Image (tube, rainbow, N blue to C red):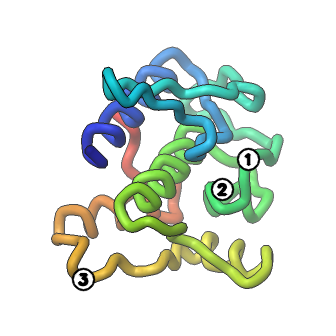
Amino acid sequence: ACKHIFRQLVRAVAYMHSKGYAHRDLKLDNILMDWQSKQIKIIDFGFSLRAKPDEKLNVFCGTPHYMDPDIVRKSPYNGAAADVWACGVILYIIYVGKLPFFGEFEADLFRKIQNGKYTQLPSELGDDKIRNLFRRIFDTNPHTRITAE
């Protein structure tokens, strides 16, 4: 079920990016699922905007646990790369059952995000394939981070 949900999410995000949009507030709260049809819908496009693939954005928004390192640093950021990072947080929560980045206070959380220091997968949950996927998603360099496509 986790793989199915995540594949749908990534397909939807790739489609949104192909049309030139970045959501900028992807999180579990903004994904609805019809349990009968197993279809998902992304909601709450209040922070979304049209952005060119190489355009740097300067409006810092989103939910702290889902923010990518550039947003946390308040550096110009790529909206699509930020969405991919947020998708990784969602996958981690679905797969592991907790947040990948956690801090006792916001500065601690932001330091872990900036360094890409997520809580390691429990050994019984992750094979090399899923571990590699998380490494590629939580790449702190948005230019080398995996894309939704």
Along the line of sight, the residue nearer the viewer: 23 or 122: 122
How far is disc 1 from disc 2 in space, using C-alphas? 6 Å
Q: Are marks 1 and 2 in contact (CB under 8 Å)?
A: yes
* Residue 136 x %, y %: 36, 60
The 10 Å Cα crowd at callout 1, few under 14, some 14 to 19, many 20 or more, is: some
67 shown above or below 118: above
**Residue at screen point 44% across, 65% down:** 97
* Residue 28 horizontal side relative to residue 109, left or right: left
In the depicted view, which residue is nearer to us: 94 or 73? 94
> Which quadrant does the N terminus fall into?
top left
Rendered location of residue 120, percent (x, y): 39, 80
Give the residue number, with chain letter if any, for mark 2: 67
Task: Determine if residue 47 is in view.
Answer: yes
Q: Secondary structure at mark 3?
A: loop
Among numbered discs 1 and 2, the one appearing first in the sequence: 1
Amino acid type for the residue under numbered disc 2: Met
The residue tagged 3 is 123
